[in-house]
Image: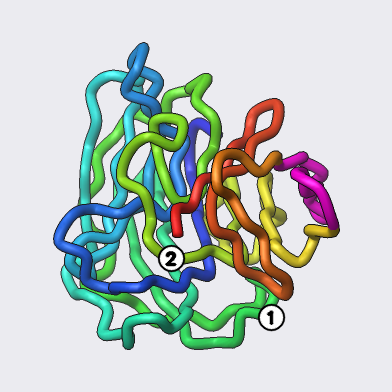
Amino acid sequence: ITGDITIIAYVTMDDWTPAVAETILSKYNTVGNQRAYILTITAGALGLSSSADGSIFVVSASSDTVSFTDGTGHWLRVTWNDSADTANYYTSDELPSTDPSAVNWDQLGNIDVAHVSAGLFDSTALIEIGALNTGSSSLLVGSVSRATITASTDPTATPAVSFDANDYSTGSTLTSSATGEVYTLNGSANTVKPGTVLSTIESTDLSTVIDD
């Protein structure tokens, strides 16, 4: 994905207002300047960082913060419009079993937050859930049950990547039933059905990391 992007995730956090940024999803490695994009939460505000060349990065954030109870799960979304150079942030209290394409969204803060970038860098970094820099930085303290990445500003469009913890059966791998990528649990990763992932996953071009 090198242009328009929508990132959606169902997230449960131990602390919804962390003082230091925690990663929800990233394709972002500072080693070798392989930055593309990262969705974070800091002090309750959602933030997007992106790079057009892998080195220089742009950051924006929601003007409002979430008011969720610690330990509860909620849907989060960011949509970046390449041509308009704007980011919009959203939340939803719908059930985790809701298909991401069917979630009804509430705007978080101002609409069309400025986020000026000449596209997204075609990074070699793994896609990670819950961390960046191959699981070494900005770890999420919590869990992610669902996550999708779509090359569109339309959240109902078919995703390029779709993670669902319910796809886990046994062993150290999980294959997405929707988009086919294979995740490998790494480190102290755990997957608990019906939908909580607690650490790292990777495939040929996909890794997910969540730290409990």
Distance between the alpha carbons at the discs numbered 2 and 1: 18 Å
User: What residue is drawn where x is 50% and y is 55%?
Assistant: 7
Examine the structure image and report whether residue 124 is included in the region drawn in magenta: no
Q: Is residue 185 above or below residue 192?
A: above
Residue located beneath label 2 in the image: 142
Task: Indicate the secondary structure of the residue bearing disc 2.
Answer: strand
Q: Quadrant of residue 120?
A: top left
Give the magenta-colored segment's residue range. Answer: 170-183
Q: Is residue 95 above or below residue 121?
A: below
User: What residue is drawn where x is 22% and y is 71%?
Assistant: 17
Q: Amino acid at mark 2?
A: Gly
Q: Amino acid at mark 1?
A: Ser
Residue 117 place in picture, x, y as percent: 29, 34
User: Hey, which residue is sitting farthest front in the picture?
Assistant: 188
Q: Residues within 10 Å of mark 2 (few under 14, many from 20)?
A: many
Residue located beneath label 1 in the image: 97
Task: Indicate the secondary structure of the residue bearing disc 1.
Answer: loop
User: What residue is drawn where x is 29% and y is 60%?
Assistant: 41
Examine the structure image and report whether residue 178 is included in the region drawn in magenta: yes
Image mark for residue 39:
none
